[in-house]
Image (cartoon, rainbow, N blue to C red):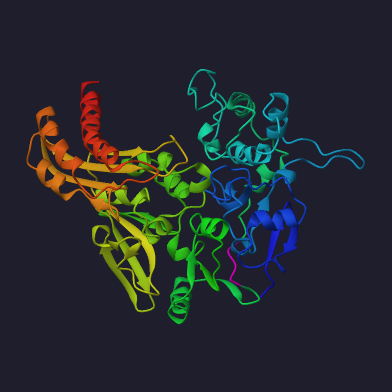
């Protein structure tokens, strides 16, 4: 097996002697690339963001920004990354490099003061700068609002980046001022070529091993042999455990690049979503085809996290506050579980058995999520959190209702943050079905929803607050649907 290597700013670098748990952040800083900073070590500040070459949606390659503090460098064996230092263009001998357009705009518009967070902003901004379907509007006012610039820049690309001293106005001004990449731009030209193919990896240092197999069949056979293995995809959860709780694993198996886990198929009866597709990939490839998921994605953490996080990882952790579970419960989704003996399909409503526990057996992987068709016409995802973006839910509520001739024929409601597991609001569903979709029905059923689950007091919210938010969410849904009809 070829020695593990990574391409950084166009130059190959061996991973050795880095430990398998070493993050991309620490690997880069040890090589002198100190523009990549550690701020929170949890993926919440973006000071560590770098660009990774990934399979594209509209072009062969997309430049994708990720949190370097969360990703183990072994996961990028054979891959290609660019740091803030690699964005500038080399000048003539004896002259300094020419600033990248994003760096130039940040400088001239006062987007940096202490500079600590600036390289992370620059990398996230560069990912949006190179987004293939970003385009300026002929009319400067068309398509522009507080979060979208006349140049097509989506400010949500920076939702995972924090700045404590500059203030966001000059950073936004810089984002809305960048133009389009030129034909000579090497990173723009790079998008026309395929990204590095995933490579089989077996990287060991001391007693720790990081493994990536080429196929699902090889992977599940390995997991049968090593039931103690830690399985990682985007590492947005495991990376926090490594950094904050000093967790270490003797044997790590990566599944993020397995082709069998990266398919997305829309058929006549279902939408099947590969468990290792990132949330950003799902969002862009579905392009609103599942409206409830389209509502979920912008509220799920930040773009930096969504560029790495997967549905398989979010469901595999079994967290009661994972945002994808309530939406998928409302969609009546099922999971395709695979092991060395084959596959089985389990309704998501039957998947969770206790706090961070599920019916998934040792050696089993989530291969895909299946959403049955047709979809309920009335759908919404409500997230209550302390921050608007990049935060963990205090309460999450997802609705999917079939309303025919003014009568609720079928109701599915998924809840997060109000029990030891994500749950269906079964009593509320039963109370709604067969009744008219009217203010009187909603007023009568809201107390039923308020009493669902077993909410608790913690540092995010009190039990009473969580219950109040449940009841209010049904009223909010009704108000929104009636306003949509009247308009």
| Residue 62 seen in this snapshot | no
Question: Which x, y percent locates residue 231?
Answer: 47, 67
Question: Which x, y percent locates residue 159?
Answer: 52, 37
The residue lying at 55 percent from left, 31 percent from top is 153
Confirm whether the magenta stretch covers residue 181: no
Left or right, 325 with respect to 126, comes to left
Residue span colored magenta: 197-202
Tell me the quadrant of the picture where the C terminus can be found.
Answer: top left
Left or right, 376 with respect to 396, comes to left
Left or right, 295 with respect to 72, comes to left
Confirm whether the magenta stretch covers residue 200: yes
The residue lying at 51 percent from left, 17 percent from top is 141
Left or right, 413 with respect to 405, comes to right
299 to 365, vertically: above or below:
above
Looking at the image, the residue that sits furthest to the right is 94
The residue lying at 60 percent from left, 60 percent from top is 72
Tell me the quadrant of the picture where the N terminus can be found.
Answer: bottom right
Question: Which x, y percent locates residue 118?
Answer: 67, 37
Q: Which image quadrant is residue 47 in?
A: top right
102 to 32, vertically: above or below:
above
Question: Which x, y percent locates residue 54?
Answer: 57, 53
Callout count: 0
The residue lying at 12 percent from left, 41 percent from top is 432
Looking at the image, which is closer to me, 128 or 308?
308
Magenta: main secondary structure equals loop
| Residue 450 seen in this snapshot | yes
Q: Which image quadrant is residue 411 in?
A: top left
Looking at the image, the residue that sits furthest to the bottom is 225
Looking at the image, which is closer to me, 451 or 348?
451
């Amino acid at each position: 097996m070829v020695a593990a290597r990574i391409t950084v700013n166009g130059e190959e670098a061996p991973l050795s002697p880095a430990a398998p748990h070493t993050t991309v952040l620490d690997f880069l800083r040890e090589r002198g690339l100190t523009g990549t900073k550690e701020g929170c070590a949890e993926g919440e500040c973006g000071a560590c963001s770098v660009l990774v070459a990934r399979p594209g949606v509209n072009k062969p390659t997309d430049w994708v920004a990720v949190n370097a503090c969360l990703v183990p460098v072994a996961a990028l064996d054979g891959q290609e990354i660019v740091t803030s230092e690699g964005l500038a263009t080399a000048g003539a001998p004896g002259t300094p490099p020419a600033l990248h357009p994003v760096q130039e705009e940040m400088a001239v518009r006062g987007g940096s003061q202490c500079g600590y967070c600036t390289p992370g902003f620059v990398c996230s901004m560069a990912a949006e700068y190179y987004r293939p379907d970003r385009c300026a509007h002929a009319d400067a006012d068309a398509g522009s609002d507080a979060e979208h610039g006349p140049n097509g820049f989506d400010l949500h690309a920076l939702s995972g980046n924090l700045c404590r001293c500059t203030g966001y106005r000059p950073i936004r001004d810089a984002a809305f001022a960048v133009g389009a990449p030129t034909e000579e731009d090497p990173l723009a030209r790079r998008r026309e070529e395929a990204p590095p193919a995933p490579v089989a990896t077996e990287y060991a240092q001391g007693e720790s091993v990081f493994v990536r197999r080429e196929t699902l069949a090889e992977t599940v056979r390995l997991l049968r042999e090593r039931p103690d293995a830690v399985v990682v995809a985007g590492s947005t959860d495991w990376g926090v455990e490594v950094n904050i709780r000093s967790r270490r694993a003797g044997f790590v198996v990566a599944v993020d690049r397995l082709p069998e886990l990266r398919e997305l198929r829309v058929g006549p009866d279902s939408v099947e979503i590969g468990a290792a597709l990132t949330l950003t990939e799902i969002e862009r490839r579905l392009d609103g085809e599942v409206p409830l998921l389209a509502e979920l994605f912008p509220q799920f953490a930040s773009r930096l996290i969504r560029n790495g996080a997967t549905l398989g990882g979010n469901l595999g952790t079994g967290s009661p506050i994972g945002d994808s579970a309530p939406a998928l419960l409302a969609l009546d989704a099922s999971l395709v579980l695979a092991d060395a003996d084959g596959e089985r399909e389990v309704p998501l409503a039957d998947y969770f058995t206790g706090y961070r526990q599920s019916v998934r057996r040792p050696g089993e992987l989530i291969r895909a999520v299946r959403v049955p068709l047709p979809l309920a016409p009335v759908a919404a995802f409500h997230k209550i959190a302390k921050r608007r973006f990049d935060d963990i839910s205090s309460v999450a509520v997802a609705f999917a209702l079939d309303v025919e001739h003014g009568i609720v024929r079928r109701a599915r409601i998924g809840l997060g943050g109000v029990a030891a597991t994500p749950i269906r609001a079964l009593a509320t569903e039963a109370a709604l079905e067969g009744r008219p979709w009217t203010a009187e029905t909603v007023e009568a059923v809201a107390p039923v929803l308020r009493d669902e689950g077993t909410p608790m007091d913690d540092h995010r919210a009190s039990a009473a607050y969580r219950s109040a938010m449940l009841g209010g969410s049904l009223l909010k849904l009704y108000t929104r649907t009636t306003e949509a009809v009247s308009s």
